[in-house]
């Protein structure tokens, strides 16, 4: 594939899709390399309580004196894990919560809820 052909295929993609792709790629990069990007470790207390934004703490500190930017960077890992894992591991609860028999309109709501849980 030539450079011209690659540019032509990129031009066909909507600009919103390209922006989303760049933001997602950046988020994944930060999540993967969090331990090298973050200034401080995840639970490290580095400053005073509720310090404002400064050159040392770009987003300030929390109620324990932990750097908020470092915590957000490490939080990207958790977010990626939560977004990727559930579709890969369907739970028994999700399959069993679907009602196998219709609830009667005349019956009580208690029996209706019980039939959809079992």
Image: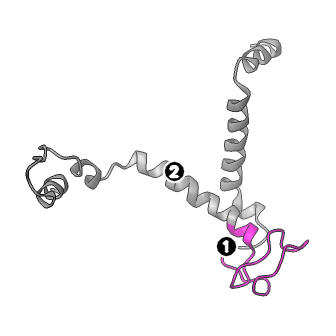
* Image coords of residue 97 (percent x, y): 24, 52
Q: Secondary structure at mark 2?
A: helix
Residue 83 image label = 2
Q: Which residue is mark 1?
A: 42
Dot 1: what SS?
Answer: loop
Part of the protein shown in magenta: 42-71
Give the quadrant of the N terminus. top right
Residue at 29% across / 51% down in the picture?
Answer: 94
Asked if residue 54 is among those painted magenta in the image, a careful observer would answer: yes
Number of marks drawn: 2
Taking the spot 69% from the left edge, 85% from the top edge, the residue there is 64
Location of residue 50 by image quarter = bottom right
Horizontal placement of 67 versus 76: left or right?
A: right
Q: Between disc 2 and disc 1, whose residue precedes?
A: 1
Which is nearer the eye, 84 or 18?
18
Q: CA distance from mark 2 to mark 1?
A: 21 Å
Depth check: give the residue in front, 82 or 4: 82
Residue at 76%, 18% in the rendered image: 11
Q: Quadrant of the C terminus?
A: bottom left
């Amino acid at each position: 594939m030539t450079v011209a052909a690659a540019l032509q295929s990129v031009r066909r993609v909507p600009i919103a899709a390209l922006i989303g792709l760049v933001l997602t790629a950046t988020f994944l990069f930060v999540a993967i390399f969090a331990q090298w990007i973050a200034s401080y470790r995840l639970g490290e207390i580095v400053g005073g309580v509720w310090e404002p934004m400064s050159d040392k703490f770009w987003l300030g500190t929390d109620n324990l004196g932990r750097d908020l930017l470092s915590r957000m960077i490490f939080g990207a890992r958790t977010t990626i894990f939560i977004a990727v894992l559930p579709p890969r591991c369907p739970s028994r609860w999700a399959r069993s919560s679907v009602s196998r028999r219709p609830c009667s309109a005349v019956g009580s709501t208690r029996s209706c809820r019980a039939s959809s849980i079992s």
